[in-house]
């Protein structure tokens, strides 16, 4: 089995004349990322590597997640994930090393949410519906693919094992 975590970057400051690529996380975004990392650790949903777009907000999100886990997680920058399309994410996922069964992408909407919806063919209906309706900042989808190689994944073939948002952690729902 292969597991792909799809993490949308945490809440960021407004652009305010700053280059989009250089937007940083807000205090709330950093808090959300810490809580989401802890929630994934409690579920033992820890990847071997976090691949981020290189934009400051995805890099900061990835670093916060990695620092909140009990074991070392490698960070990789993949500039193609910035301004990516779902097709870009799909192509990148199919090229993942088969030596890594658990990987996370930290990216941007709309691509990360659209990609999650396109890949999830089964799972709990309420979670599938919520994910399709809205993929907020710092949301995480865990997709399980019943394959031996990343090159075998395809649209609609994943089981949505988890979809969780920071607001659910605040209310205690889905935890």
Image (cartoon, rainbow, N blue to C red):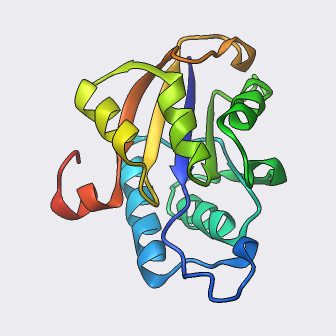
The quarter of the displayed image where residue 6 is located = top right
Q: Is residue 110 left or right of 81 when viewed as pictured?
A: left
Q: Residue at x 61, y 54 (%)?
A: 108
In the image, 69 versus 175, the foreground residue is 175
In the image, 138 versus 65, the foreground residue is 138
Q: Residue at x 46, y 83 (%)?
A: 27
Q: Is residue 25 left or right of 36 when viewed as pictured?
A: right
Q: Is residue 58 left or right of 83 when viewed as pictured?
A: left
In the image as oriented, which residue stretches furthest toward the front? 17
**Residue 49 picture location, percent across and down:** 68, 45
The quarter of the displayed image where residue 1 is located = top right
**Residue 43 picture location, percent across and down:** 36, 42
Residue 49, placed above or below residue 138: above
In the image, 137 versus 171, the foreground residue is 137
**Residue 86 picture location, percent across and down:** 65, 36
Residue 19, placed above or below residue 101: below
Q: Residue at x 34, y 22 (%)?
A: 123
Residue 118, placed above or below residue 170: above
Q: How many marks?
A: 0
The quarter of the displayed image where residue 172 is located = bottom left
Residue 36, placed above or below residue 150: below
């Amino acid at each position: 089995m292969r597991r792909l975590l799809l993490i949308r970057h945490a809440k960021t400051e407004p652009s305010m004349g700053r280059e989009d690529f250089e937007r940083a996380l807000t205090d709330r975004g950093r808090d959300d990322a810490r809580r989401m990392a802890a929630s994934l650790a409690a579920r033992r949903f820890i990847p071997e590597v976090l691949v981020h777009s290189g934009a400051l907000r995805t890099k900061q999100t990835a670093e916060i997640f990695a620092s909140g886990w009990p074991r070392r997680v490698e960070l990789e920058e993949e500039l193609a994930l910035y301004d990516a399309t779902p097709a870009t994410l799909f192509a990148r996922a199919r090229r993942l090393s088969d030596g890594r069964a658990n990987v996370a992408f930290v990216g941007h909407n709309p691509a990360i949410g659209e990609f999650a919806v396109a890949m999830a063919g089964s799972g709990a209906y309420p979670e599938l519906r919520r994910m399709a309706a809205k993929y907020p900042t710092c949301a995480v989808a865990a997709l399980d693919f019943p394959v031996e190689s990343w090159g075998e994944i395809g649209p609609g073939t994943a089981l949505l094992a988890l979809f969780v948002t920071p607001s659910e952690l605040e209310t205690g729902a889905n935890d």
